[in-house]
Image: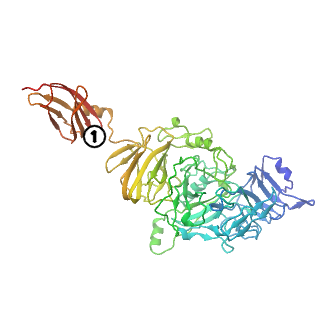
Amino acid sequence: MRNFYSKLFFLLLPALSVGQLHIKSSTGGSNAYVFNNGEIIYVNQEIGMDGNPDQTGGNLYLRNEGQLIQGENSSNSGTGIVSVYQENTRNAWDYHMWASPVGDPNESNPNNGNAGNARFYLDSGNGGGVYQVIDELDSDAATFSASYNGIAAPLTLSTTWLYKYIATQGYSGWSKISSGNPLLPGEGFSMKGVGSGTTPTSTAFDFRGIPNNGNIEVDVKPTQRTLVGNPYPSALNLSYYLLYNSGQSVANCLGTYSGTPSTGTEVITGEAFFWESDPNVQSHYLADYLGGYGTFTPLMDCTSLGEYTSPTYVMYNEDGTVRSDGPSIDTDDPLVNEIERKIAPIGQGFFVLGRDLTASEQTAVDGGAPLPTLQVTMKNDFRVFIKETNAVYDPEFKNNSSSKGAKTAQKNGSNSSLNPGGLTYTEDGILIMPKFVLSTVVNHQYVRTLKGIMYESATLGFDRAGDGENRSSLPSDINFLLEDSDKSYLMNIFPYQIENKLALKLSGANPTNTYEIKVTDINFTPDESIYLHDKLTDEYHDILDESYEFELEQGTYTDRFEIVFKDSKTLDVEEVEEVKRSFNIYQNNGRAELTVLNPLQTELKEVNVFDISGRLLVSKLNEGTSEKVIIPSNAWSDGVYIVRVTTRDNIEYTKKVSVRNIK
């Protein structure tokens, strides 16, 4: 076992990799500690530390986005702590979902994975906790108060908003964190920020404790949600985690030090849900909240950056149900404020959803059995050394958006390089899939964003770790519907064929509801275009370049509207010419009649007659599929006239006729 005593030793190295690490509290009468300044420390086995949170010696300090990654499923030990910062990004009114990267050194293992991991109480009574930063080595333990508002200095966290949410459903499922209900490794928790006003106070939280390592299991149940999070003092490949725990292929999934990927078991759906809210709402009352859950999926492939769709904010009743009225209109570009989610930073919490019941489980539950308890697993394989300042990944804790343009370019690729159904890779090996974004203004109040993503390995039904469910539906809304599912989806991943049809679900709570829909972003060149097809009227509305607005009466429409890529009523060139050749127009001067013959019984929209100056003389509308249309000409002056026939498909046929009335 190797011992390291000098802070200077680590400042001289860009990175460090060792088999084991033991940090003594002192040597030769001087404090001994490890200080990692913005680099990676990789320890293949266990870490032992002899310090404690209230002294400098015997501890490991991760600073300037320095991170710790471990290899084997080894148990860390000792009374010493890892100290790792994460920035507060919420004001005192606003929730954030967290996960602790450490446990309390004086606590026992809760038997949910690696035996060296421990419960976490947040306060400093068990050898760890959340601290306020004083300088690069020293921190003071945060205090806790039952008052509603947290305070930045001295750091005071409100216990009123500390909750976890494990294998449950509904607003009543929130469970308050307390001395009798601490956080287990891997469990996420809710906490409001600190500071007054609507701008987050720039306050770093110092998590101090024994570093979590190895396999960590958290309970989930089929169809139920669980709040989990990144439990390590390093970044996490969230795509790898979601693919593994949904039983999807993990080919090309890599952590910084992971070996050959192995496929996991289907436990969750492969989606991650993130709470977002309006920071301008200065209230602690649920009825005043304005927020919702955004959805991330890996798009079924680890080489993709995945896709995240921000929520349309909803308003809540006192019992946690969604109010029928929505927020005021938000016309921002739906892509501008989206946060990259593939790499979860230290401390990031998120929700996962348990898979559907199997047939046998459903039978048992129908017979009165409880839902089975499953476990979603975190592994060292998922850990990566990626800083929050990385230009591509741009995570939520980052406080600036200077790299947003670079990230968008990496993610969306170039329009000219993509065809429908085709794939391409950036120079960095990132998979780019063809994608379009639909933005719909509902009732002139709010915008709902939907995304269609094309991937050859997907299906038209639900694809684990691919399709993204809408967990914040509004009473008046628009969503994708998938085959064999009645759930509402924000993201639809599907194999492209020009004949494919993507079903939509439209709901309207008002007596009359308006929808204005348009394609607002696209990274490929369509074979034809993108249309909204109204199956009731059989009309195709091109929404690629212009928006289409329409009204619906109160109700839910699941079999009327669809997104298509081809106007099936549009005829090809040969069909158009065949229709034109079929018409025969002639003038019978003896009977003073103009006759239009329609032997193919093509549906006619208009038959118009103009004089030679272009003045309209006669217009016959909606003649249907009549084989013959007769127009009297006895009132016309002698001369040349122009006859124009227009079909329902807007095919036009024009012919000149000579009229000479015989008297």
Task: Residue type at mark 1: give it.
Answer: Arg
Name the element at disc 1. loop
Residue 612 at x, y = what percent? 23, 25
The single residue placed furthest to the left in the displayed view is 663
The correct choice, above or below, for 571 with respect to 252 in the image is above
Q: Pointer 1: what residue?
A: 648
Coordinates of residue 125 in the picture (x, y in percent): 76, 71
Q: Residue 335: give x, y in percent of width and height.
A: 55, 47
Question: Which colour assignment does the render follow?
Answer: rainbow
Image coords of residue 607 (percent x, y): 22, 36
Quarter of the image with the C terminus in it: top left
Of residues 73 and 153, the one drawn nearer to the viewer in this rendering: 153
In the depicted view, which residue is nearer to us: 625 or 88? 88
Q: Residues within 10 Å of mark 1 (few under 14, many from 20)?
A: some
Residue at horizontal 69 percent and vertical 64 percent from the top: 150
Instruction: Tell me, yes or no, if residue 239 can be seen here.
Output: yes
Left/right placement of residue 459 relative to residue 232 reads left
- The N terminus lies in which quarter of the figure? bottom right
Relative vertical location of residue 388 with respect to residue 350 in this rendering, above or below: above
Image point (32%, 37%), residue name: 571
